[in-house]
Image (cartoon, grey):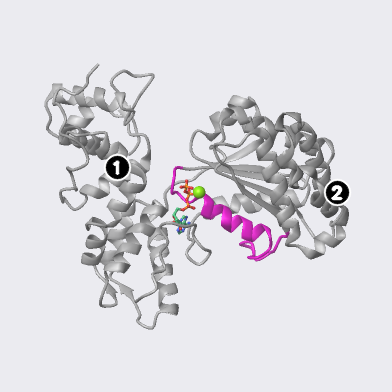
Amino acid sequence: MKFNPFRPNSIASSDLFQGRKEEMLLIEQSLFQTKNGNPQHFLVEGERGLGKSSLFLMVEQQASGKIPLRNSEKVNFIVINIELDSTQTFFEILKTIAADFKRALSERDGIKKLASGVWDFLSNWEILGVRYHKMDENLIQPYEILNELVVNFERVIKQAQSEIDGILILIDEADRPSEKASLGELIKLLTEKLSKRGCDQVVIGMTGQPGLIAKLKASHESSSRIFSVLTLKPLSDDENKAVVLSGLRKANQINKEQTTIDNEALKLISQLSEGYPHFLQEFASKAFEKDVDGRICIEDVKEGAFGVHGALKQLGHKYFNELYFTQIGSDEYRRVLQAMSQFSDSWVNGEKIKNEITIKDTTLNNALQALKTRNIIIPNPGHIGEFRLPTKSFAAWIKAFYMLDEEPFTGNYAEPENEQGTGE
Ligand SMILES: Nc1ncnc2c1ncn2[C@@H]1O[C@H](COP(=O)(O)OP(=O)(O)OP(=O)(O)O)[C@@H](O)[C@H]1O
Ligand SMILES: [Mg+2]
């Protein structure tokens, strides 16, 4: 048995984490500004599996002083780190922030002593105690709670000034609550109340999938203007390779049996992943699993990727089978998607698709209409006849499938489709 260092299903630990230098630099600057009384809130947008939560874990560790900043300085923030879900209301979000504020304080004895009033308040606050369960949510004034929070942020910063540089509120999965939860309004009110009270050492970092900004705007037009927006991109080829090599270093510290990787194999993992960290972990993990002689070669990567329980199948189960197999019975329609994947998530028209594959006009038109109706491709509102794939990662997954010219695992997912399609 060998310890496998790759983690396709969980957030990257700091020893596996690579890249994101620009983003971390900007966030470090934001922490530095906040420490000095000019908070610069940040919002990180990125597709599923691109590494948003992993980035926030690094930020949490830096902000709380567990690991130094790049210039080897240390900062010391109280870090509230929450993850939202689709069921939460405005009130529930505030309560989650308050509960994590209490958790963060409970871990810091020094601060708890300096700001004992705040700790006592949080310990007895009705919304955090058992009594809340007996309370009718309609009777609770969310704005009161918001005020109480602000007052206590201010108190802790004043009273523990000698110990801390500020408070960082990290909100992951911020796109998930419904528009009714009015997260945009909540954030706008929170930041305004803090500045009115001159409490300028509280900074908010938020992350979510593309569409988050529009959602925030829907509940408060100017809420998104509070943030500097960072858009996560796939990792570079060098960063992909660095992730794999750092995993192997970790494995070699733990396993007696050492593992190396051939350059070609490393290159193929990087190519297949197209820089998607989740894909990278999945391909690397499967290649590591396939290796039996302590040297990961190109065959191990291929078997790991294309095998029966291989990486592409795993990624399909997690994200794409519904779009690519369950909803489509026709191989012709899949070929259209394959052609579109060459353009990632950019707009393409019929001409461009026909440059990639040989297909009859009627089949192509039927395919485009059917794929549009099933929300598998998105029509360009400004240009009739132009479409795109919904995400870059869907395109990367389809491309990986066909990279070695091997037939993908078709069939058994859906009945063959009527060639006429559904049309419109
Ligand atoms: N910078 C990185 N270096 C190495 N591995 C990474 C990096 N970022 C993310 N990963 C890995 O990629 C996968 C996805 O990461 P993570 O869960 O952070 O993404 P996410 O954007 O939060 O995804 P989701 O939208 O599904 O929550 C995990 O397996 C994680 O270990
Ligand atoms: Mg995440």
First of labels 2, 1 by sequence position: 2
Say which of 112 and 45 sits in front. 112
Percent from the top left, x then y, of residue 423? 22, 19
**Residue 71 magenta-highlighted:** yes
Q: Is mark 1 on a helix, strand or loop?
A: helix
How far apart marks 2 and 1 lie (CA) works out to 51 Å
Give me the disc on residue 321. 1
Residue 265 in the image: above or below residue 260 = above
Percent from the top left, x then y, of residue 11? 49, 57
Percent from the top left, x then y, of residue 36? 77, 50
The residue beneath circle 2 is 155
Q: In this view, does 407 lie to the left or right of 312?
A: left
Give the residue drawn at x 19%, y 24%: 421
Q: Nearer the viewer, mark 2 or mark 1?
A: 1
For badge 2, the amino acid type reads Arg
For badge 1, the amino acid type reads Asn
Residue 86 in the image: above or below residue 37 = above
Percent from the top left, x then y, of residue 136? 72, 33
Q: What stretch is highlighted in magenta?
A: 47-76
